[in-house]
Image (cartoon, rainbow, N blue to C red):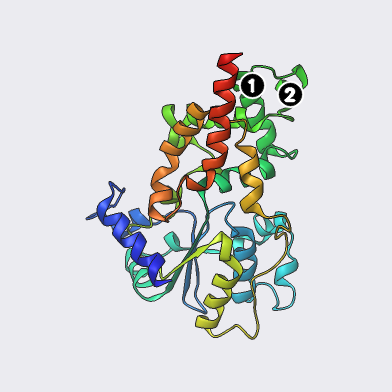
Amino acid sequence: MKTRRRHLKDACSSLKSPKKDGVPVRNITTEFMFVDERHRLLYCAIPKVGCTNFIRLMYGLTANADSDGYQDIGAGEVHAEYRKYLTPLNSFSDFGIQFRLDHYLKVILVRHPFERLVSAFRNKLERHTILSFNEGTIIAKYFEPHATKATIRTGDGVTFEGFVRYLNFKAAKDPDALDQHWRRFFELCNPCDVHYDVIGRHETVERDVNMVLKVLGVADLFHYPRKNMQHVSSADLWKIYFTNVSSSQLTKLWAFYKLDGDLFNYTLNSLNFVVKKRLRNEHMAVLT
């Protein structure tokens, strides 16, 4: 954990990161930061990085769900009916915000930016959701050259390649309008201004969160929920989705999310085999 914190600190110092020196403390809070007063815990919830399970856990910690039932709360309930039980950091006075930033255990969970995008695509666009209709229809109409009339009408059936083209367009034109599920970490959680004590990684999330519970002294009562945890390796699955993304689109996409990667020590190296395969295929296409 010290290594992760040190890397983030060094990255914030050396990179052109969006640090907000000299601004009111309220300006570094976001709608994604929540606190558990009972255990002096502050958590920044990044969508598609285990946030549903961590929020389930927070409902248990705050006694808004019993210690046996918190892990069985449905995903819809987590972000709807139960949402009122979460205490936003920005609901406090400036003094209260600063006190909690100084004295509470601050937790953030991260994952490879591209892995997160695939998770968001699978969950929000491959399934029939509000996002698959609202954003899916836009993707189908403007970013899918071979979209069917049905896909344009419903948003169902958009491809990951179309999603990437859409993201690159939005990133260039209006990045602030991106949906929270694909907004960047530094915009959601201000990691160069909030000095997180625990930087959990998706690949070690269960171990990292259970360590947090030990620090809080509640490991005998609570554990990281296993609900909806993938049995197929997410680290392998997400790379498959990028095999049909063009090298130019891939380069643009990484340029947009690179700061997140630099801050939390994620690189494009894990996609090297995909990039090489794509470049080889493009080269062969030119020759034929």
**Crowd class of label 2 (few under 14; some 14 to 19; many from 20; radius 10 Å):** many
User: Residue 162 falls in which quadrant of the image?
Assistant: top right
Q: What is the x, y in percent for residue 168?
A: 49, 30
Cα distance between the residues tagged 2 and 1: 10 Å
Left or right, 200 with reference to 62? left
Looking at the rendering, in which quadrant would you find the C terminus? top right
**Crowd class of label 1 (few under 14; some 14 to 19; many from 20; radius 10 Å):** many
Residue at the left extreme?
22
User: Residue 229 falls in which quadrant of the image?
Assistant: bottom right
Q: Which residue is mark 2?
A: 151
Secondary structure under the numbered disc 2 in the rendered image: helix
Q: What is the x, y in percent for residue 278?
A: 57, 30
Q: Which residue is mark 1?
A: 144
The label on residue 247 is none
Left or right, 247 with reference to 132? left
Question: Considering only order in the chain, which callout, 1 or 2, is on the residue closer to the N terminus?
Answer: 1
Label 2 sits on what residue type? Thr
Q: For the point 50% across and 82% down, which residue is it? A: 215
